[in-house]
Amino acid sequence: MTRTDGLLGRRRARVVRRHILRGAHCLRRGWYAEGERWARRAEEVAHRMDPAGHPALMVELASLWHGLIRYRPARECALRVAGPLSAAPPGPGRDGPLVDALVLLGDVERRLARYGRAEAYLRRAEELAGEADRRRLVAVRLALGVLCKETGRHGEAEVFYREALALLERHGGDPLARADALHNLAGLAHARREAGGERHIRAAIGIRRAVLGPRHVQVAADLTVLGALLTERGDLDEAEDALRRADDILRERLGDDHYEVAVCQVNLARLDALRGRADEAARRRRDALRVKRLTLGPDHPEVRRLAASVPG
Protein backbone atom coordinates (compact mmCIF):
# COMPACT_ATOMS: atom_id res chain seq x y z
CA MET A 1 0.00 0.00 0.00
CA THR A 2 1.38 3.40 -0.97
CA ARG A 3 1.50 6.45 1.29
CA THR A 4 -1.28 8.00 -0.79
CA ASP A 5 -3.46 4.90 -0.30
CA GLY A 6 -2.88 5.09 3.43
CA LEU A 7 -3.87 8.75 3.60
CA LEU A 8 -6.98 8.09 1.52
CA GLY A 9 -7.96 5.19 3.77
CA ARG A 10 -7.60 7.28 6.92
CA ARG A 11 -9.57 10.12 5.36
CA ARG A 12 -12.39 7.74 4.44
CA ALA A 13 -12.37 6.29 7.95
CA ARG A 14 -12.77 9.78 9.43
CA VAL A 15 -15.71 10.47 7.10
CA VAL A 16 -17.37 7.17 8.05
CA ARG A 17 -16.91 7.91 11.76
CA ARG A 18 -18.43 11.37 11.39
CA HIS A 19 -21.45 9.93 9.61
CA ILE A 20 -21.82 7.19 12.26
CA LEU A 21 -21.64 9.73 15.09
CA ARG A 22 -24.33 11.84 13.44
CA GLY A 23 -26.48 8.78 12.86
CA ALA A 24 -26.01 7.65 16.48
CA HIS A 25 -27.00 11.12 17.70
CA CYS A 26 -30.20 10.92 15.64
CA LEU A 27 -30.85 7.43 17.00
CA ARG A 28 -30.51 8.64 20.60
CA ARG A 29 -32.98 11.42 19.89
CA GLY A 30 -35.39 9.02 18.20
CA TRP A 31 -34.97 10.58 14.72
CA TYR A 32 -34.86 7.28 12.88
CA ALA A 33 -35.36 8.50 9.32
CA GLU A 34 -32.52 11.03 9.65
CA GLY A 35 -30.35 8.42 11.38
CA GLU A 36 -30.87 6.04 8.48
CA ARG A 37 -29.77 8.70 6.00
CA TRP A 38 -26.47 9.10 7.87
CA ALA A 39 -26.04 5.31 8.05
CA ARG A 40 -26.46 5.06 4.27
CA ARG A 41 -23.87 7.79 3.73
CA ALA A 42 -21.45 5.96 6.03
CA GLU A 43 -22.12 2.70 4.17
CA GLU A 44 -21.34 4.28 0.80
CA VAL A 45 -17.89 5.39 1.98
CA ALA A 46 -17.21 2.19 3.98
CA HIS A 47 -17.67 0.05 0.87
CA ARG A 48 -14.51 1.70 -0.53
CA MET A 49 -12.48 0.71 2.55
CA ASP A 50 -10.77 -2.49 3.68
CA PRO A 51 -12.94 -3.71 6.61
CA ALA A 52 -10.04 -5.68 8.09
CA GLY A 53 -8.16 -2.42 8.61
CA HIS A 54 -10.98 -0.78 10.57
CA PRO A 55 -12.77 -3.54 12.54
CA ALA A 56 -14.08 -1.38 15.40
CA LEU A 57 -15.42 1.21 12.95
CA MET A 58 -17.26 -1.43 10.92
CA VAL A 59 -18.78 -2.85 14.11
CA GLU A 60 -19.98 0.66 15.01
CA LEU A 61 -21.66 0.94 11.62
CA ALA A 62 -23.29 -2.49 12.04
CA SER A 63 -24.48 -1.40 15.51
CA LEU A 64 -26.01 1.74 14.03
CA TRP A 65 -27.94 -0.31 11.46
CA HIS A 66 -29.03 -2.67 14.23
CA GLY A 67 -30.21 0.20 16.43
CA LEU A 68 -32.19 1.53 13.48
CA ILE A 69 -33.88 -1.89 13.29
CA ARG A 70 -32.53 -2.47 9.78
CA TYR A 71 -31.37 -6.02 10.26
CA ARG A 72 -30.24 -7.04 6.80
CA PRO A 73 -27.71 -4.21 6.33
CA ALA A 74 -26.58 -4.79 9.95
CA ARG A 75 -25.92 -8.45 9.11
CA GLU A 76 -24.04 -7.63 5.90
CA CYS A 77 -21.86 -5.08 7.67
CA ALA A 78 -21.10 -7.41 10.61
CA LEU A 79 -20.21 -10.28 8.25
CA ARG A 80 -17.76 -8.04 6.38
CA VAL A 81 -15.76 -7.57 9.56
CA ALA A 82 -16.32 -10.94 11.29
CA GLY A 83 -14.74 -12.93 8.46
CA PRO A 84 -11.33 -11.20 8.45
CA LEU A 85 -11.26 -10.99 12.26
CA SER A 86 -11.93 -14.73 12.65
CA ALA A 87 -8.86 -15.43 10.51
CA ALA A 88 -6.64 -13.00 12.46
CA PRO A 89 -4.42 -14.05 15.41
CA PRO A 90 -6.12 -13.94 18.84
CA GLY A 91 -5.57 -10.88 20.99
CA PRO A 92 -7.36 -7.89 22.55
CA GLY A 93 -7.37 -5.95 19.27
CA ARG A 94 -9.17 -8.82 17.55
CA ASP A 95 -11.29 -10.46 20.24
CA GLY A 96 -13.28 -7.40 21.38
CA PRO A 97 -14.51 -6.26 17.95
CA LEU A 98 -15.11 -9.90 16.97
CA VAL A 99 -17.33 -10.47 20.02
CA ASP A 100 -19.30 -7.34 19.16
CA ALA A 101 -19.75 -8.50 15.56
CA LEU A 102 -20.80 -12.01 16.65
CA VAL A 103 -23.39 -10.64 19.10
CA LEU A 104 -24.86 -8.49 16.34
CA LEU A 105 -24.94 -11.45 13.97
CA GLY A 106 -26.55 -13.64 16.61
CA ASP A 107 -29.28 -11.12 17.31
CA VAL A 108 -30.00 -10.52 13.61
CA GLU A 109 -30.20 -14.25 12.87
CA ARG A 110 -32.58 -14.68 15.81
CA ARG A 111 -34.84 -11.93 14.49
CA LEU A 112 -34.87 -13.67 11.11
CA ALA A 113 -35.85 -16.95 12.87
CA ARG A 114 -32.55 -18.67 12.04
CA TYR A 115 -32.12 -19.90 15.58
CA GLY A 116 -29.36 -22.47 15.05
CA ARG A 117 -27.10 -19.91 13.39
CA ALA A 118 -27.93 -17.36 16.07
CA GLU A 119 -26.91 -19.67 18.89
CA ALA A 120 -23.68 -20.68 17.14
CA TYR A 121 -22.64 -17.02 16.81
CA LEU A 122 -23.54 -16.23 20.42
CA ARG A 123 -21.80 -19.28 21.91
CA ARG A 124 -18.64 -18.34 20.02
CA ALA A 125 -18.96 -14.79 21.36
CA GLU A 126 -19.37 -16.18 24.89
CA GLU A 127 -16.12 -18.15 24.55
CA LEU A 128 -14.20 -15.08 23.38
CA ALA A 129 -15.63 -12.58 25.87
CA GLY A 130 -14.43 -14.32 29.02
CA GLU A 131 -15.04 -13.11 32.56
CA ALA A 132 -12.68 -10.13 32.27
CA ASP A 133 -14.63 -8.28 29.59
CA ARG A 134 -17.76 -7.69 31.66
CA ARG A 135 -19.45 -5.22 29.30
CA ARG A 136 -19.33 -7.66 26.41
CA LEU A 137 -20.22 -10.61 28.64
CA VAL A 138 -23.40 -8.78 29.71
CA ALA A 139 -24.31 -8.22 26.05
CA VAL A 140 -23.77 -11.92 25.26
CA ARG A 141 -25.83 -13.04 28.27
CA LEU A 142 -28.74 -10.78 27.31
CA ALA A 143 -28.67 -11.93 23.68
CA LEU A 144 -28.59 -15.61 24.71
CA GLY A 145 -31.48 -14.99 27.10
CA VAL A 146 -33.67 -13.51 24.37
CA LEU A 147 -32.83 -16.42 22.07
CA CYS A 148 -33.77 -18.94 24.77
CA LYS A 149 -37.05 -17.13 25.49
CA GLU A 150 -38.03 -17.13 21.81
CA THR A 151 -37.25 -20.84 21.48
CA GLY A 152 -39.26 -21.77 24.59
CA ARG A 153 -36.32 -22.36 26.95
CA HIS A 154 -37.66 -20.07 29.64
CA GLY A 155 -35.58 -21.45 32.50
CA GLU A 156 -32.34 -20.88 30.61
CA ALA A 157 -33.50 -17.41 29.60
CA GLU A 158 -34.06 -16.41 33.22
CA VAL A 159 -30.58 -17.64 34.20
CA PHE A 160 -28.94 -15.55 31.46
CA TYR A 161 -30.96 -12.42 32.33
CA ARG A 162 -30.21 -12.68 36.04
CA GLU A 163 -26.52 -13.32 35.40
CA ALA A 164 -26.37 -10.17 33.27
CA LEU A 165 -28.20 -8.13 35.91
CA ALA A 166 -25.93 -9.46 38.67
CA LEU A 167 -22.83 -8.46 36.70
CA LEU A 168 -24.20 -4.95 36.22
CA GLU A 169 -25.18 -4.55 39.86
CA ARG A 170 -21.89 -5.96 41.15
CA HIS A 171 -19.50 -4.07 38.90
CA GLY A 172 -21.51 -1.13 37.58
CA GLY A 173 -21.94 -0.36 33.92
CA ASP A 174 -24.27 1.11 31.35
CA PRO A 175 -27.64 1.95 32.94
CA LEU A 176 -29.34 1.24 29.62
CA ALA A 177 -27.97 -2.31 29.72
CA ARG A 178 -29.58 -2.67 33.15
CA ALA A 179 -32.84 -1.38 31.66
CA ASP A 180 -32.51 -4.00 28.89
CA ALA A 181 -32.12 -6.77 31.49
CA LEU A 182 -35.17 -5.54 33.44
CA HIS A 183 -37.22 -5.20 30.23
CA ASN A 184 -36.31 -8.78 29.28
CA LEU A 185 -37.19 -10.13 32.73
CA ALA A 186 -40.56 -8.39 32.51
CA GLY A 187 -41.20 -9.88 29.07
CA LEU A 188 -40.27 -13.33 30.37
CA ALA A 189 -42.65 -12.97 33.32
CA HIS A 190 -45.41 -12.05 30.86
CA ALA A 191 -44.65 -15.08 28.70
CA ARG A 192 -44.73 -17.36 31.76
CA ARG A 193 -47.82 -15.68 33.25
CA GLU A 194 -45.85 -15.00 36.45
CA ALA A 195 -45.84 -12.09 38.90
CA GLY A 196 -42.97 -9.62 39.18
CA GLY A 197 -42.87 -8.37 35.63
CA GLU A 198 -44.60 -5.07 36.39
CA ARG A 199 -41.95 -4.14 38.98
CA HIS A 200 -39.16 -4.84 36.49
CA ILE A 201 -40.69 -2.89 33.61
CA ARG A 202 -41.51 0.15 35.75
CA ALA A 203 -37.88 0.24 36.87
CA ALA A 204 -36.74 0.01 33.23
CA ILE A 205 -39.06 2.89 32.26
CA GLY A 206 -37.62 5.04 35.06
CA ILE A 207 -34.03 4.40 33.90
CA ARG A 208 -34.72 5.09 30.24
CA ARG A 209 -36.76 8.21 30.86
CA ALA A 210 -33.92 9.61 32.98
CA VAL A 211 -31.26 8.80 30.36
CA LEU A 212 -33.14 9.15 27.04
CA GLY A 213 -36.12 11.39 27.78
CA PRO A 214 -39.82 10.54 27.98
CA ARG A 215 -40.57 10.20 24.25
CA HIS A 216 -37.80 7.87 23.14
CA VAL A 217 -38.54 4.71 21.14
CA GLN A 218 -37.07 2.49 23.88
CA VAL A 219 -39.36 4.10 26.45
CA ALA A 220 -42.27 3.33 24.13
CA ALA A 221 -41.13 -0.31 23.87
CA ASP A 222 -41.14 -0.50 27.69
CA LEU A 223 -44.62 1.06 27.78
CA THR A 224 -45.81 -1.63 25.35
CA VAL A 225 -44.64 -4.35 27.75
CA LEU A 226 -46.20 -2.52 30.71
CA GLY A 227 -49.49 -2.30 28.81
CA ALA A 228 -49.40 -6.02 28.06
CA LEU A 229 -48.75 -6.89 31.72
CA LEU A 230 -51.52 -4.58 32.96
CA THR A 231 -53.94 -6.04 30.40
CA GLU A 232 -53.35 -9.56 31.69
CA ARG A 233 -53.78 -8.31 35.27
CA GLY A 234 -57.14 -6.79 34.30
CA ASP A 235 -56.17 -3.14 34.85
CA LEU A 236 -57.51 -2.15 31.44
CA ASP A 237 -57.67 1.62 31.95
CA GLU A 238 -53.99 2.01 32.85
CA ALA A 239 -53.06 -0.58 30.22
CA GLU A 240 -54.86 1.40 27.51
CA ASP A 241 -53.18 4.62 28.63
CA ALA A 242 -49.71 2.98 28.46
CA LEU A 243 -50.33 1.37 25.07
CA ARG A 244 -51.78 4.50 23.48
CA ARG A 245 -48.80 6.55 24.71
CA ALA A 246 -46.47 3.92 23.26
CA ASP A 247 -48.36 3.90 19.96
CA ASP A 248 -48.20 7.69 19.74
CA ILE A 249 -44.42 7.78 20.31
CA LEU A 250 -43.68 4.90 17.95
CA ARG A 251 -45.74 6.32 15.09
CA GLU A 252 -44.20 9.75 15.56
CA ARG A 253 -40.63 8.41 15.62
CA LEU A 254 -40.81 5.41 13.30
CA GLY A 255 -43.81 5.88 11.02
CA ASP A 256 -46.84 3.63 10.64
CA ASP A 257 -45.14 0.70 8.90
CA HIS A 258 -42.53 -0.23 11.48
CA TYR A 259 -42.17 -3.53 13.33
CA GLU A 260 -42.37 -1.94 16.80
CA VAL A 261 -45.65 -0.26 15.82
CA ALA A 262 -46.99 -3.70 14.85
CA VAL A 263 -45.99 -5.14 18.24
CA CYS A 264 -47.91 -2.37 19.99
CA GLN A 265 -50.92 -2.94 17.70
CA VAL A 266 -51.10 -6.61 18.68
CA ASN A 267 -51.25 -5.63 22.36
CA LEU A 268 -53.87 -2.96 21.68
CA ALA A 269 -55.90 -5.56 19.77
CA ARG A 270 -55.84 -7.85 22.82
CA LEU A 271 -57.12 -4.98 24.97
CA ASP A 272 -59.81 -4.05 22.42
CA ALA A 273 -61.03 -7.64 22.39
CA LEU A 274 -61.34 -7.67 26.18
CA ARG A 275 -63.30 -4.40 26.06
CA GLY A 276 -65.71 -5.86 23.49
CA ARG A 277 -64.40 -3.82 20.54
CA ALA A 278 -64.16 -6.79 18.20
CA ASP A 279 -64.06 -4.83 14.93
CA GLU A 280 -61.28 -2.57 16.20
CA ALA A 281 -59.32 -5.58 17.46
CA ALA A 282 -59.60 -7.29 14.07
CA ARG A 283 -58.52 -4.11 12.26
CA ARG A 284 -55.43 -3.76 14.47
CA ARG A 285 -54.44 -7.41 13.96
CA ARG A 286 -54.78 -7.10 10.18
CA ASP A 287 -52.62 -3.98 10.18
CA ALA A 288 -50.02 -5.61 12.44
CA LEU A 289 -49.95 -8.66 10.17
CA ARG A 290 -49.37 -6.46 7.11
CA VAL A 291 -46.41 -4.71 8.78
CA LYS A 292 -44.86 -7.90 10.16
CA ARG A 293 -45.07 -9.54 6.74
CA LEU A 294 -43.23 -6.56 5.27
CA THR A 295 -40.58 -6.64 8.00
CA LEU A 296 -40.05 -10.36 8.63
CA GLY A 297 -41.38 -12.06 5.50
CA PRO A 298 -44.47 -14.26 5.11
CA ASP A 299 -42.89 -17.48 6.44
CA HIS A 300 -41.55 -16.16 9.74
CA PRO A 301 -42.98 -18.07 12.76
CA GLU A 302 -44.18 -14.83 14.36
CA VAL A 303 -46.07 -13.92 11.18
CA ARG A 304 -47.67 -17.36 10.95
CA ARG A 305 -48.84 -17.20 14.58
CA LEU A 306 -50.40 -13.79 14.06
CA ALA A 307 -51.99 -14.84 10.75
CA ALA A 308 -53.78 -17.68 12.56
CA SER A 309 -55.58 -15.10 14.74
CA VAL A 310 -56.67 -12.84 11.87
CA PRO A 311 -60.09 -13.64 10.38
CA GLY A 312 -59.99 -14.21 6.63
Image (spheres, rainbow, N blue to C red):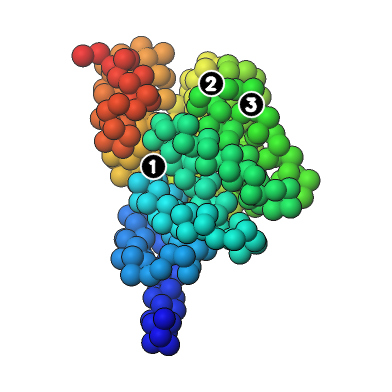
Q: Where is residue 34 shown, x and y percent of the image? A: 34, 59
Instruction: Report, in whole angstroms, how far the alpha carbon at label 3 lies from the one at label 2.
Output: 9 Å
Q: Which mark is residue 152?
A: 2
Residue 153's spot in the image, x, y percent? 58, 22
Which residue is at the front of the view, 146 or 204? Answer: 146
Q: Which callout, 3 or 1, points at the residue further toward the start of the chain?
A: 3
Give the residue drawn at x 53%, y 46%.
103
Q: From this viewpoint, is residue 17 visible?
A: yes
In the rendered view, tell whether residue 216 sits above or below residue 244: below
| Residue 264 appearing in the image | no
Determine the secondary structure under disc 2.
loop
Position of residue 229 measured from the top left corner of the image (x, y, whole percent): 54, 23
**Chain-order first, disc 2 or disc 1:** 2
Q: Which residue is mark 3?
A: 156
Mark 3: which secondary structure?
helix
Residue appearing at x 40%, y 19% in the figure: 270
Query: What is the quadrant of residue 305 in the picture?
Result: top left
What amino acid type is highlighted by mark number 1? Leu
**Quarter of the image with the N terminus in it:** bottom left
Q: How many marks?
A: 3
Q: Residues within 10 Å of mark 1 (few under 14, many from 20)?
A: many
